[in-house]
Image (cartoon, rainbow, N blue to C red):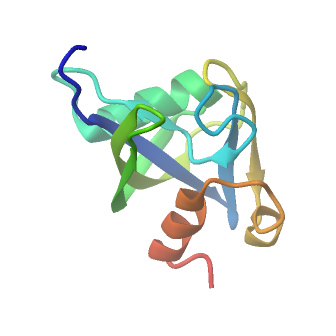
Amino acid sequence: MEHQRPRITAAVLVEKDGKFLLAERNKQNYNGYWVIPGGGVQFGETLKDAAVRELKEETNIDADIIKQICYKEIINVPGNYHSIVFYYLAKPKNNNIKAKGDVSQAKFFSIEEIKKLKIAESVELVLKEAGFWK
């Protein structure tokens, strides 16, 4: 078995008019769950650049990063998953959402709508860290 290492990833919480962009995963890990869009950081790429690139790849949204919110370590050894995710807050530059790649759909939701969705635990954690989820 090859030497395994944690994966460094970056994700973007896009806020527009009090609503937040979430994406529904279509991959094995968290399939059917709504998540904050993001993905792996490539060698030589900054966390912010990776966050913006992954957001574009998964949702077609271009965004301006405002600040880093927090980071979260996700370890699931039986599921062969270990990731350190850096979360950023951003404002969208366009509204033309097109879900692709790891996501089947992406939409903006209010906090009340998010509370009714099947979400990854990280969504609530990040929204609380950012001060939006009371």
Residue at 80% across / 57% down in the picture?
117
49 in relation to 132, above or below: above
Residue at 21% across / 14% down in the picture?
2
Could you say where residue 65 lies in the image, as x and y percent from the top left? 39, 49
Whether residue 119 sits left or right of residue 46 in the image: it is: right
User: Which image quadrant for residue 15?
Assistant: bottom right
Front residue of this view, candidates 37 and 30: 30
127 in relation to 63, above or below: below
Whether residue 61 sits left or right of residue 130 in the image: it is: right
Quadrant of image for the N terminus: top left
Quadrant of image for the C terminus: bottom right
User: Which image quadrant for residue 115?
Assistant: bottom right
Residue at 62% across / 47% down in the picture?
35
User: Which image quadrant for residue 43?
Assistant: top left
Front residue of this view, candidates 104 and 19: 104
Could you say where residue 21 lies in the image, as x and y percent from the top left? 66, 49
Q: Residue furthest top?
A: 1
Could you say where residue 73 lies in the image, as x and y percent from the top left? 34, 53
Whether residue 92 sits left or right of residue 3 in the image: it is: right
47 in relation to 127, above or below: above
Tally of numbered tags: 0
